[in-house]
Image (spheres, grey):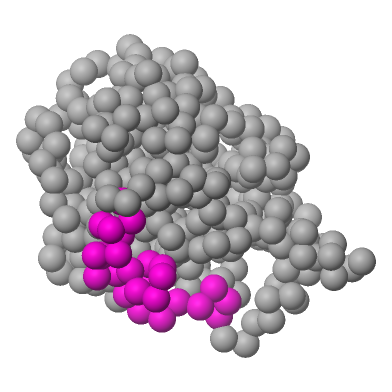
């Protein structure tokens, strides 16, 4: 009975970190299946990272990690008070200028060179296929699809539930012109009503011209994918937007690796890097950066500014909910990279120089 309980908990709860889930019963069309097979990153029936990436780091027992995750969480794992935030009218933002609005975790809106982009929107109250698991913190789920203007490009970095939410992307569909995603992810979107011609389905190391002089570079990250027990049938992505105003790196999820230095050498310096910082643990740091690794990744990229995401909305790791922001701030004090730390819903003026962002997570 204990074994069954732990097994179920693994799939439903710890799955927020390790989750890999099937394509919800939908078969890949022949053309998509063939393109996947032709990818140099698809081997032995699944996509592969550029370097060896076990889910658990050496010396860690999966069952001990899962037990600790379930029963020995930090008592401050979920905030005692609602997360502070701002309700910005996104439809009334001036069309000129370069702006970002963060919605907690890894969801954010970009308005650059007149192009409107939305990344990994999750506006459901849960980052899980099962209601009751991975519930959003009080105050963190302020926005819905109805709050958004038309979206020129919807970006999906990978198909885990905390980045690709069925209810959200279905609600957004009438407003979305194009979707950018990794190979294979389009099968989810087509199943939810998106037309094939709306999809820009990409491999790593491609370049696409978007509108208004914005160039998209599709890049690797060190992670995994899936929506069930089957892993890595779809590709996980990071993106670089080369815009008239500057370069923005959209990191998605992933552990630290050599790819950051390669991207920095090829595309750096990066004016504004958005990197994950949260839901980490030394046991799974191969697939989620620890705070010191997030900082090193930013340095490898040659980042002039760093915005940490993947925090402050869902508890997918046993650390305190506000530890990611506090620890990154502490570690950054010696050789600082300017940190951009907005509240949920707060407008960030991109490429506008340094700002003294208050430590709102201590309020």
The residue lying furthest to the front in this view is 30
Question: Residue shown at 17%/21% (left/top)?
Answer: 96
The residue lying furthest to the top in this view is 92
Question: Residue shown at 64%/58% (left/top)?
Answer: 15
Give the answer, above or below, for where 196 lies relative to 292. Answer: above
Horizontal relation, residue 83 to residue 309: left or right = right
Q: Position of residue 228 (x, y in %)?
A: 59, 55
In the picture, the quarter occupied by the N terminus is bottom right
Question: Residue shown at 32%/25% (left/top)?
Answer: 176
Give the answer, above or below, for where 186 lies relative to 323. Answer: above
Question: Residue shown at 69%/58% (left/top)?
Answer: 11
Q: Position of residue 324 (x, y in %)?
A: 54, 56
Q: Which residues are magenta?
A: 32-57
Give the answer, above or below, for where 271 lies relative to 56. Answer: above
Give the answer, above or below, for where 90 lies relative to 259. Answer: above
Q: Position of residue 38 (x, y in %)?
A: 24, 65
Quadrant in which residue 19 is drawn: bottom right
- Is 55 within the magenta? yes
Q: Position of residue 242 (x, y in %)?
A: 14, 46
- Is 253 within the magenta? no
């Amino acid at each position: 009975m204990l074994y069954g309980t732990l097994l179920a908990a693994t799939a439903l709860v710890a799955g927020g970190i390790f989750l890999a889930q099937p394509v919800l019963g939908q078969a890949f069309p022949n053309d998509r299946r063939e393109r996947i097979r032709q990818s140099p990153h698809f081997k032995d029936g699944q996509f592969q990272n550029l370097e060896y990436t076990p889910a658990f780091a050496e010396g860690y027992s999966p069952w001990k990690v899962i037990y600790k995750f379930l029963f020995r969480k930090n008592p401050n794992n979920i905030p005692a008070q609602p997360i502070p935030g701002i309700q910005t009218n996104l439809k009334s933002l001036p069309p000129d200028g370069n702006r970002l609005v963060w919605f907690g975790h890894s969801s954010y809106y970009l308005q650059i060179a007149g192009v409107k982009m939305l990344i990994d929107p999750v506006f459901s109250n849960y980052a899980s296929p099962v209601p009751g698991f991975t519930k959003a913190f009080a105050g963190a789920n302020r926005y819905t699809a109805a709050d958004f203007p038309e979206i020129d490009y919807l970006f999906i970095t990978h198909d885990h539930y905390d980045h690709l939410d069925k209810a959200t992307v279905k609600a957004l569909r009438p407003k979305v012109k194009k979707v950018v995603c990794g190979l294979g992810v389009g099968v989810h979107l087509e199943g939810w009503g998106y037309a094939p011609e709306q999809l820009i389905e990409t491999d790593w190391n491609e370049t696409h011209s978007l509108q208004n002089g914005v160039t998209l570079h599709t890049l690797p990250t060190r992670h995994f994918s899936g929506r069930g027990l089957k892993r890595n049938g779809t590709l996980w992505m990071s993106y670089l937007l080369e815009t008239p105003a500057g370069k923005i790196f959209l990191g998605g999820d992933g552990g630290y690796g050599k790819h950051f230095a390669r991207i920095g050498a090829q595309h750096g310096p990066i004016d504004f890097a958005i990197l994950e910082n949260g839901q980490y643990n030394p046991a799974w740091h191969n697939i989620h950066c620890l705070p010191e690794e997030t900082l090193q990744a930013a340095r490898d990229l040659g980042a002039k500014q760093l915005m940490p995401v993947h925090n402050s909305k869902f508890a997918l790791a046993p650390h305190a909910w506000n530890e990611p922001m506090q620890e990154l701030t502490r570690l950054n004090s010696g050789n600082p990279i300017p940190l951009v730390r907005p509240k949920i819903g707060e407008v960030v003026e991109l490429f506008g120089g340094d700002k003294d962002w208050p430590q709102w997570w201590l309020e």
